[in-house]
Amino acid sequence: MKSSETDSAMRLDKWLWATRFFKTRALAQKHIELGRVLVNGAKVKNSKNISAGDTLDLTLNSLPYKINVLALNHQRRPAPEARKLYEEDMQTAQLREQQKLLDQASRISAAYPDGRPTKRDRRQIDKVKRGDW
């Protein structure tokens, strides 16, 4: 028997896990402790109870998320159902997409875009440096 209080509030780490932002509750707790999750603009603890209408500022993989909590669900459900529990700020989503594009562009202009040179590539580079080619 659940009271109406438990239906209207839920632990932050459990909600982040249920909405599939994190694979485990332990990862969610770690991000909260590191200050990467803010509730209504304030740093909070793992056990902070959130309710519908709260705003979360989340940083995942150096990308910003601004989320409005629409509903609570105490069980981890499939991704399409989990997306119905929150609404994302469109401005932040556009900013995140721009950052992703910048990251991709910087990877393309990297010294070794396909990864490190293979042993064969290194031998060829050494030949060119020595002047044996």
Image (tube, rainbow, N blue to C red):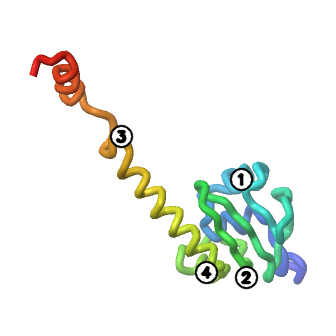
- Marks 1 and 4, the one that precedes in the sequence: 1
- Marks 2 and 4, the one that precedes in the sequence: 2
- Marks 3 and 1, the one that precedes in the sequence: 1
User: Where is mark 3, residue-wise?
Assistant: 111
Residue 78 on image: x %, y %: 54, 74
Q: Are marks 2 and 4 in contact (CB under 8 Å)?
A: no
Secondary-structure class at tag 1: helix
- Marks 3 and 2, the one that precedes in the sequence: 2
Residue 3 on image: x %, y %: 89, 80
Q: What residue type is labelled 4?
A: Met
Q: What residue type is labelled 1?
A: His
Secondary-structure class at tag 3: loop
Q: What is the distance, in whole Å, between disc 3 and disc 2 at their CAs? A: 47 Å
Graded by Cα atoms within 10 Å as few (under 14), some (14 to 19) or many (20 or more), the crowding at tag 4 reads few
The image's mark for residue 90 is: 4
Graded by Cα atoms within 10 Å as few (under 14), some (14 to 19) or many (20 or more), the crowding at tag 3 reads few
Residue in the image at 77% along x and 75% along y: 55
Secondary-structure class at tag 2: loop
Q: Do the residues labelled 3 and 2 touch (CB within 8 Å)?
A: no
Q: What is the distance, in whole Å, between disc 2 and disc 4 at their CAs? A: 19 Å
Q: What residue type is labelled 3?
A: Ala
Question: Toward which corner of the image does residue 133 lie, by quadrant?
Answer: top left
Left or right side of 67 for 121: left
